[in-house]
Amino acid sequence: MSETFTGEIHAMIKGRRIVLGITGGIAAYKAAELTRAFIKEGASVRVIMTKNASEFITPLTLQTLSGHLVYRDMFSPLKDFEMDHISLADFAEILVIAPATANVIGKIASGIADDLLTTTVMTTKAPLLICPAMNQSMYENPIVKENIMSLASRGYHFIDPGYGELACSTEGYGRLPDIEDIVDEVESMLTVKDLSGEKILVTAGPTREPFDPVRYISNYSSGKMGYALAVASRRRGARTIMVSGPTSLPVPKGIIFIPVKSALEMRDAVMDHLAESTVIIKAAAVADYRPSTRSDSKIKKEKGPLTISLERNPDIIDEIGRKKGKRVLVGFAVETENLIQRAREKMLAKKMDLIVANDVTQDGAGFGYDTNIIKILTPAGEVEELPLMSKYEVAHRILDRIRDIIRSR
Ligand code: CTP
């Protein structure tokens, strides 16, 4: 499942230098789409094609999409090219092989460098992402498996092929992974792992407070800010747990996901994981009140008005603040007036190490948007004002501050 729920869930690919190696399999045509996706993300792409790859897709297609000559031959006069294999290897901040045939995987695993692509692989210091695509029987061949395992154990990255219809009229594993999944993996690989070793607990989304089997009280939280934080936290190397109220967002890959509904359930889930966490980010919009009673059957309409009495929910962040010890605690303040002053009061009263102040009256900020306009406050009195940016970029800025707090201790 793709993680493009904020519409802009990548931030690290922009401006980066990607070398894309295309080898000779039927999925080579999908490399055109991958090139486009990288370019759309703002990367600078150079394409190397093997001789067999150009039997499946023309270099002109890739040249047009990447905006640069396609590199194919080790021995062409260099004047025809901007770079040789050494400069291509230096140029690459990441090298992606998609599709990668059993043949190229075998060659790399055996240290063979007999064409431009394998020579570049051998020369580069950049990380390598290999995206195998082949017939299922080939993929299951023990020699191929062994080659993949041997390369993986040396630190090469792989994305497992997808399941589905294969070009040879069979069904199975062997399809090139989805383009978004490859782009997501590249984003992860380009993200500095400066939070590895941390255990980050994120809460996200609204809570639902039921008063009969079919109705509840809730709020407009979409969960996007919390989900962006969980994705960014995982990509920066933290073990990430997300306790989430009901949202319509796909569950991010690679995290521990704990779905809850009500504030009471959220409180219990958070407390269950508090001990193991080093950082807690409370992005959830927890309902402050819940109906005092819950009818077992649907409440029928009557002539007069209906009164529902409410009682206080536990203040989860307040409880964490009292128990947190050395943990870093980050809260959010959603306000419609006196933003800074109220946020500061909340931060100090609940022993937070940072508070993210969110004025939801501004266009592009708060519930439902893919973007946010926030201010980050510290107990020392600093106020960092961020301009309108995607929630994913906001997530990284919050995590930057958390990293700085951890480093300063
Ligand atoms: N929060 C919480 N438990 C609650 C209510 C809020 O943990 N029962 C957390 C939110 O996740 C957020 C922070 O408290 O990180 C501030 O939430 P907000 O609703 O802005 O503030 P409240 O403290 O509830 O104050 P008020 O509603 O009076 O503005």
Image (cartoon, rainbow, N blue to C red):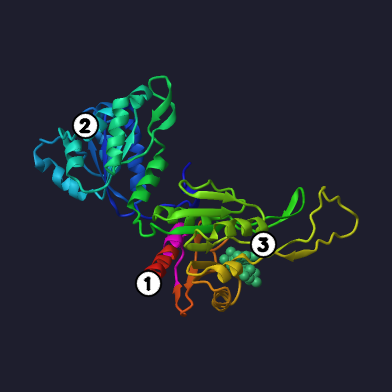
Q: Would residue 249 be found to the left or right of residue 390 on screen? A: right
Q: Which residue is mark 1?
A: 408
Looking at marks 2 and 1 on the same chain, the residue that comes earlier in the sequence is marked by 2
Crowding near pointer 3: few (<14 within 10 Å), some, many (20+)? many
C-beta proximity under 8 Å, tags 2 and 1: no
Q: Which mark is residue 287?
A: 3
Q: CA distance from mark 2 to mark 1?
A: 46 Å
Eyeballing the image, is 362 above or below 96?
below
Q: Would residue 98 be found to the left or right of residue 304 on screen? A: left
Instruction: Report the magenta residues as a range.
Output: 385-397
Give the percent coordinates (x, y) of residue 357: 53, 70
Looking at marks 3 and 1 on the same chain, the residue that comes earlier in the sequence is marked by 3
Give the percent coordinates (x, y) of residue 319: 61, 68
Looking at marks 2 and 3 on the same chain, the residue that comes earlier in the sequence is marked by 2
Q: CA distance from mark 2 to mark 3?
A: 58 Å
Give the percent coordinates (x, y) of residue 346: 58, 74
Q: Is residue 86 visible?
A: yes
Q: Which mark is residue 176?
A: none
